[in-house]
Image (spheres, grey):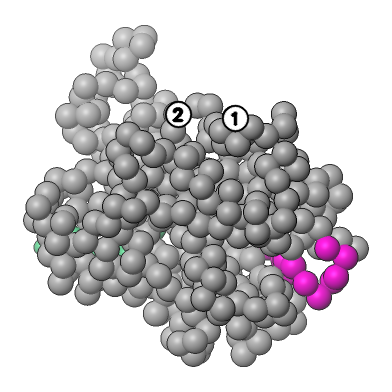
Amino acid sequence: MLRSKISGIGMYVPKNVFTNNDLVKYMDTSDEWIQERTGIKERRYADRTGETTTTMGVEAAKIAIERAGTTAQDIDFIVFATICPDYYFPGCGVLLQRAMQMKEIGALDVRNQCSGFLYALSVADQFIKTGMYKNILVVASEKHSFGLDFSTRGRNISVIFGDGAGAVVLQPTENVNSGILSTHLHSDGNNAEILAMYNPGTHANHWLNGKELADFENAEIGDMFMSHAMIDKAQNFPTMDGQAVFKVAVEKFPAVIKESLEANNLQTSDLRLLIPHQANLRISQFVQRKMELRDDQVYNNIQKYGNTTAASIPIALCEAWEMGKVKEGDLVCLAAFGSGFTWASALLRW
Ligand code: UT7
């Protein structure tokens, strides 16, 4: 029986540090409010024109590939997760394939928001286990800073996001005590609109029941996808009912972690490290208390990078590994929850 194993991991964060006080210059907020509600002290923002979601992904991928002891030409499949694609289409997968001069391999784009990396990892895991591919590159990268409302209107969401990328190379192993033990993926679309970016899109208000959005009544052919009215009403920015998301997050995180442990007849005491998606430090702390985990069993770095959506788990995993917090044989649980709603976990033996 084949298992897939992370044989190389890399991360990239842009060099521009944006502190909470830097945000005060743009909107009515404060360092105190942001730290108290989210734990975030600072985040990184990509160079506005010199870096894209794809170029950051490439930087993380180069490190992961080198650490896996392989080359870009040996990669036989790409899975790229992001909600900040360079283009609406084509996706970042092919842009990375081009930038890294890879062979004409498959490049799959995954859009599952905060759970994106775990969905991507799960897909890659299946391809490895069936023997279809031997060197899969899984990348998660986000350039949020290019698409946020930096006025006070957008402050509840804009202060939490940061830019960055993480990548792993998955390879097969015949050691059944090593690698990805299981993945669990979930969704519930009933609350799709409470954490979303509505435009550009083709919904024409269909799902939005009375929400004050751009007027589609008199739309002409060609008007529908992006209009001046949408921009005037700031509908090209993400929107979130933070409290409603928070309530479901603190329920689903523990559930999906428990599900992964139970599926493998393991317990929280067996866990060396839990790496939760870095949505909000308060959510991670709530999950830690609920799961009765010690401080050294949970790794958080949202304080430095903010919420980097799909990229947050591979960035945190890479950093924890570089710090020696994850060693061969350690049991590691990765868990995510976010827009969709989607939530997921992966349990792995390093
Ligand atoms: O990664 C994807 C998944 N996302 C999440 O898991 C996010 C979950 N939600 C959260 O993390 C929190 O809800 C937030 C951090 C986003 C917001 O914290 P909150 O405690 O839920 O704040 P709130 O939205 O209920 O707003 C409370 C007050 C409001 O003022 P009033 O109406 O009480 O006067 C907001 O206008 O705080 C105000 N506020 C701010 N004040 C200063 C909202 N954002 C800010 C801000 N600075 N940045």
- Ligand 1 - quadrant of the structure image: bottom left
**292 within the magenta span:** no
Mark 1 vs mark 2, CA separation in Å: 17 Å
User: Is the residue marked 1 within 8 Å of ligand 1, measured from its CB?
Assistant: no
Depth check, mark 1 against mark 2: the one in front is 1
Region rendered in magenta: 173-183
Disc 2 crowd rating (10 Å Cα; few below 14, some 14-19, many 20+) is few
Q: Earlier in the sequence, mark 1 or mark 2?
A: 2
Residue 314 in the image: above or below residue 191: below
Q: Residue at x 66, y 48 (%)?
A: 137
Residue 207 placement (x, y as % from top left): 39, 36
In the image, what residue type sits under mark 1? Arg
* Res. 333 image quadrant: bottom right
Residue 315 at x, y = what percent? 49, 61
Q: Quadrant of the N terminus?
A: bottom right
Q: Which residue is mark 2?
A: 88
Three-letter residue code for mark 2: Tyr
Q: Is residue 71 above or below residue 224?
A: below
Residue 75 lies in quadrant: top right
Tell me if I can see residue 198 in this picture. no
> Is residue 80 visible to the viewer in this orientation of the structure?
yes
Answer above or below: position of 51 versus 309. Answer: above
Residue bearing mark 1:
98
Residue 215 place in picture, x, y as percent: 24, 24
Q: As drawn, is 67 to the left or to the right of 306?
A: right
